[in-house]
Amino acid sequence: MNTKKLQSFVSENAIYIVLAVLLIGIAVYEPSFIGLNTLRDILIQSSTRVIIALGVAFILITGGTDLSAGRMVGLTAVVSASMLQEVDYARRFFPNLPELPMFVPVLIAIAVGLLFGLINGVIVAKFKVPPFIATLGTMVAIYGINSLYFDTDPNQSQPIGGLRSDFTNLLGSGSIGKGDFSIPYIVIIAIVVCAIVWVMFNKTRLGKNMYAIGGNEQAAKVSGINVSKNLILIYSIAGALYGLAGVMEAARTGGATNNYGNMYELDAIAACVVGGVSTTGGIGTVPGIMAGVLIFTVINYGLTFVGVGPYWQQIIKGAIIVAAVAFDMRKYANKK
Amino acid sequence: MSEFMLEMKGITKEFPGVKALDGVTLQVRPGTVHALMGENGAGKSTLMKCLFGIYKPDDGEIVLNGQKAEINNSSDALKLGVSMIHQELHPVPFRNVMENIWLGRFPMQGWGPLRFVDHKKMYKDTEELFKQLDIDLNPETIVGKLSVSKIQSIEIAKAVSFNSQIIVMDEPTSSLTSVEVEHLFRIINDLKKRGVSIIYISHKMEEILRISDDVTIMRDGKKIGTWPAAEMTTDLIISKMVGRDLTQRFPDRHNVPNGVILKVDKLTSSNPKSFKDVSFELRKGEILGVGGLVGAQRTELIEALFGLREIQSGTISIGGKEVKIRSAGEAKKHGLALLTEERRTTGIFPVLSVHENGAIANMSRYVTSIGLLNDRKKKAEVNQMVEKLRTKTPSPKTLIMNLSGGNQQKVLLARWLLTEPDILLLDEPTRGIDVGAKYEIYSIIADLAQQGKSIIMISSEMPELLGMSDRVMVMSEGRLTGIVDGDKATEEEIMRLAAQH
């Protein structure tokens, strides 16, 4: 490989190289970092995040943005938790609710996410409100709605606990296999979601339309793409993904409050951006987003592992976000 | 004063894989118009970017007025008296005329921290500037509301206000009406008298021969030569640009129009300022040219046919059946295709590949029974069409923004041909495209007509309109003023119809 090829290899794969360097650096500094347990922990912590990030990525690639993602995760976590408590738990959200088949509350929560995504989509596509403002509005309003629901009698803003073990097992802590070689269910779910989204991005009309709308909305319209319909669909899918993430967040932590999901959207946007998604639209890949999410988890987990304090972690994360975008910009400026 | 206002000597610039400029020398005499010609990709814009410090030449030097100049960015260039009027203008649309002119160097008044913009002086200076240049504009008009030609005169005024000795104009007439072109030429003559040198980049031969004193021709990053314009002819320039003799500017057409395919009856726009009562028929296999000045509402008319603009009254019939077209999607279903005038704003997806750009209007054809896209079929069909139109691209995966204008246009044509349309609406299909590529686009259009496709082609270039059309329909201020036979019509006749209202 000559220098030019090496240069272009580095710039095309910067994100994966950064991830590898981080992992190797931490492993060299603290060899006990290497191990299946570490890997499992990192994957578990990345699972919910990658699903939120994929939802946000749909919208970023259309040239929009979504500030309401985190609050939607919070709302759907509360909705699913409120219907999935043990029947004999002392403080139930719905004291008289019979034990539902697990998929019912899960689907309701996902549907709630989809509904609010749909609302975002309609506001953006039909009322032409810029996505930043539209989702800023719904972000604030959804928190209000969630808090109202959370405050109803008899719950009155008490943290929802006592979740059913079948639920927390399947969508939370459970895994296939035994001991060192077990694979957590939520990691499998996340991988399946990544695969489905990859297919949507690359093999469906919706995906092509998403890239086209983000690449040049006017040209998309002239090409016969129904821009509003596609945008509404995309925001709805994103909402459904937040719904799924909310359910998983409730199961993983074994509970929910109205403050769940606070600021998750910013983590998701940061992961997307670091993973090469362009905030001006038209660019982004699923592997890139996955790597972006992993980088942040590795920073969180790995740096804690080697004893770097949380404040320093924040500084490093911030620097990585800015550096990643600056690097990307340079890549495009060079092509001019 | 030295013999030359500007000398660029032996400028060489290499990009990875291509030698964009190879020892190019350009000598511009004071007070002259120096035409810089060449096909797209010949290196004209790269040379100008070197002049403005946007690119740093690998070799060579720039001498301004006898002094070696060091230009590292465009503000250096401005300080040294070099300015440029870009083909695509980028004013600040929400601010007014004078603020756009004095942007970054507003006249100030007051002392110390209490220095404020002196609006009165700015207004007076602007007025004076406009008087000198015979520009009729209110300095306080919001720029976004002005026409392209007005914005261009603002840019020229701005260049003059910098006391520029060299003004580069890149395709300045590409969106001007002939009346506006005359005004521009008057301004250029004025500038010449003040000793300003103008480097004039254009593809329009008639203009070049009329306005310029010297002509420099470039090809493939090299300078072919400089000649006095008086010694040049259109054919001579073209043959030097393409490196071969172009005996014909337009291909022979063998299409035989027969039977009406599209009938438009008393079509009136919902916008009272747009087209009114337009009725015409388009025959199968016919090329119907649409002439008119800027503001004739030609683009608005064909965008309405394509469902992108609202219609208040009137009917459209395709193949004898009345149709209602409310969106581009519906237009597509009725066998219509539209190549828009603004390739960049409404045509290409800059960050997507050639392949994706070609496929986007035709995705429904590639959806398989399980709802996924058939990649193999998509790739094969798009690549075949892109190749058939002889598009030059390093690979189908290349981002379209890295292609030349002519090749981008071919990809867009491929996009629409893949939808197998019956009627193609082409809005200025050769705008900003070099001579060689133009001929290729003309051949494609002629071929399509021969295959029985019907074509409506808007063009502001008279020779193109007359050379390519079976009939020419002329519009003026939103009304159809006449339809003339393409073979018999004269430029005068079309001009007369175009200026009727």
Image: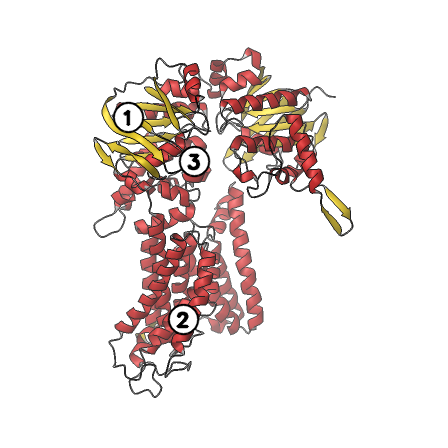
Q: Chain of mark 2?
A: A
Residue B413 visible to the viewer: no
Pointer 2 residue:
A145
Element on which disc 3 rests: helix
- Which residue is label 3 attached to? B343
- Residue type beneath disc 1: Leu
Q: Amino acid at mark 3?
A: Arg
Work out how far the residue at label 1 is from the one at label 2, CA to CA, in angstroms. Answer: 58 Å
Q: Amino acid at mark 2?
A: Ile
Pick the front one: A179 or B210: B210
Mark 1 and mark 3 lie on one chain; the one further toward the N terminus is 1
Residue B155 numbered mark, or none: none
Q: How crowded is the residue under tag 3: few (<14 C-alpha within 10 Å), some, or many (20+)?
A: many
Q: Is residue B314 left or right of residue B5?
A: left
Label 1: element kind: strand
Residue at the spot x=29%, y=35% of the render?
Answer: B336
Tell me what residue is drawn at x 66 percent, y 29 percent: B62
Q: Is residue B121 above or below residue A116?
A: above
Residue wearing tag 1: B282
Q: Is residue B2 visible?
A: yes
Give me the C-alpha separation between circle 3 and circle 2: 46 Å
Which mark's residue is nearer the viewer, 3 or 2? Answer: 2
* Chain holding disc 1: B
Quarter of the rendering occupied by the C terminus of chain B: top left
> Which quadrant of the figure contains the N terminus of chain B?
top right
Residue sitting at 32 percent across and 23 percent down? B287
Give percent across and percent down for residue B447: 30, 24
Marks 1/3 in contact by CB < 8 Å: the verdict is no
